[in-house]
Amino acid sequence: MEYFLQQKLVEDKKFKKYLDENSNYIKYLNRNPENYKIFMKEMKELYKERTSDKLSDMVNTIDIVSSLIDTFK
């Protein structure tokens, strides 16, 4: 595996955790560093770190706060 890729994977605990749970990615990343994009995409989907997930969470939080404010009125 290329050095820069190893550094990226070691720096973030979520990457390491995902690799521990899905060890088959080690083989894919060793064979082709371009598989890193696929790895990142699937990891973000699992941990809900995509931009759309973050926006959805923010909207849900705003709805909850709004309903609480309406309740106290």
Image (cartoon, rainbow, N blue to C red):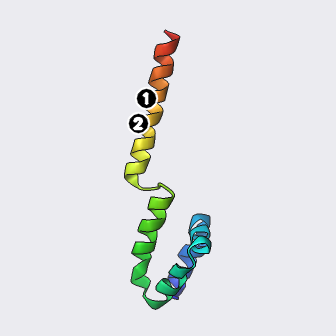
Depicted 68 relative to depicted 40: above or below: above
Q: Residues within 10 Å of mark 1 (few under 14, many from 20)?
A: few
Which amino acid does the dot numbered 1 rest on? Asp
The residue where tag 2 is placed is 59
Q: Give the side of residue 38 with respect to residue 24, left or right.
A: left
Q: Where residue 57 sits in the image (x, y, percent)? A: 45, 42
Which amino acid does the dot numbered 2 rest on? Val
The residue where tag 1 is placed is 63
Marks 1/2: CA–CA distance: 6 Å
Q: Mark 1: which secondary structure?
A: helix
Q: Residues within 10 Å of mark 2 (few under 14, many from 20)?
A: few
Q: Where residue 37 sits in the image (x, y, percent)? A: 40, 74
Residue at 39% x, 52% y is: 51
Q: Residue furthest top?
A: 73
Can you tell which quarter of the image residue 18 is in? bottom right
Contact between marks 1 and 2 (CB within 8 A): the answer is: yes
Depicted 36 relative to depicted 58: above or below: below
Depicted 36 relative to depicted 67: above or below: below
Q: Give the side of residue 7 with respect to residue 36, left or right.
A: right
Q: Nearer the viewer, residue 10 or 19?
A: 19
Q: Where residue 34 sits in the image (x, y, percent)? A: 39, 82
Q: Where residue 49 sits in the image (x, y, percent)? A: 46, 55
Q: Give the side of residue 29 with respect to residue 23, left or right.
A: left
Q: Mark 2: which secondary structure?
A: helix
Residue at 44% x, 39% y is: 58
